[in-house]
Image: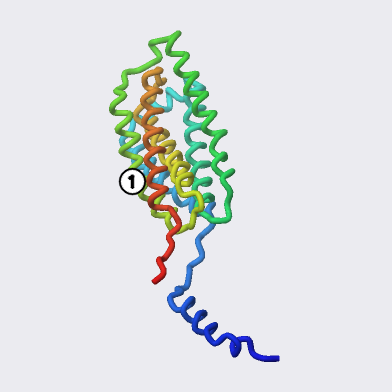
Amino acid sequence: MSDVTSLNPGTNGLIADLVADLQPVKRLPSPWLRAALWLGIVVVLACALATVADLSALRHRLMGAPDMWLAVLGSTATAGLAAIAAFQLGLPDRGRAWALLPLPGLALWLGASGLGCARTWFLPETHGPADGKDCMMFIIGLSVPLTVVMFAMLRRGYSLYPSLAGAVGGLAVAAAAATLLNFFHPFDAAITDLAVHATAVALVVGANRLLGGAILAPRRRARA
């Protein structure tokens, strides 16, 4: 039986060219572990903010308004589930369905926040003074470093849906920032506050979607 390479003298050269620039690839940690690491950074940030927040006022408000702690639970769940979904979407063998993972947390967050708004219509005194501009700046400002860390971790993967992965990552970032806002916003959100928060979250998600398309797109080396 004749040697295949003897019939195709260019085969060895072609294989040599293909493997010449290959570098060893370090296996990525699991998406669950990377999501846990990112959420750990959020927890560290929460601990730092707690040192300058009025925790007694926050505790009193959470105990007095069930819908508020449900809203906090919803935003926290959204951040965690969206982070898991984003890192899952960062792998090439994961489907778009992972983007649906944060929906239960998001539904609880929106529903409980809506209940808080409804109560302020009937009991206006339950709503404290708030500056919508400050809330928006807090969410957007805190989202910047969280986004930098998120994309630095996501970029090591190979997402087939970079814009979707970026948007879901943005939802995790925005939900985490909105959760941490409660340290300095320990009262019900009126409809205007909720609109401001929703706008800030939408801006963060939209910006991350655009960044995802630019930063997380599969990188293909140009052939000479």
Expressed as whole percent of the image width and height from the top left, the position of residue 177 reads: 39, 37
Residue drawn at (50%, 29%) of the image = 109
How many numbered discs, if any? 1
Left/right of residue 109 with respect to residue 210 in the rendered view: right
Expressed as whole percent of the image width and height from the top left, the position of residue 113 reads: 47, 23
Instruction: Answer above or below: position of 126 versus 154.
Output: above
Q: List the single residue furthest toward the right.
A: 1
Residue drawn at (39%, 30%) of the image = 182
Q: Nearer the viewer, residue 79 or 99?
A: 99
Expressed as whole percent of the image width and height from the top left, the position of residue 26 reads: 48, 67
Q: List the single residue furthest toward the front.
A: 7
Q: Using the rendered view, name the quadrant where residue 126 is placed.
A: top left
SS at mark 1 in the image: helix
Q: Nearer the viewer, residue 135 or 18?
A: 18
Q: List the single residue furthest toward the top.
A: 122
Q: Quadrant of the N terminus?
A: bottom right
Q: Nearer the viewer, residue 129 or 64?
A: 129
**Tag 1: residue type?**
Pro
Expressed as whole percent of the image width and height from the top left, the position of residue 99 reads: 54, 42
Q: Nearer the viewer, residue 169 or 180?
A: 169
Query: Where does label 1 land, which residue?
Result: 145
Q: Quadrant of the C terminus?
A: bottom left
Instruction: Answer above or below: position of 80 versus 69.
Output: below
Residue drawn at (34%, 29%) of the image = 184
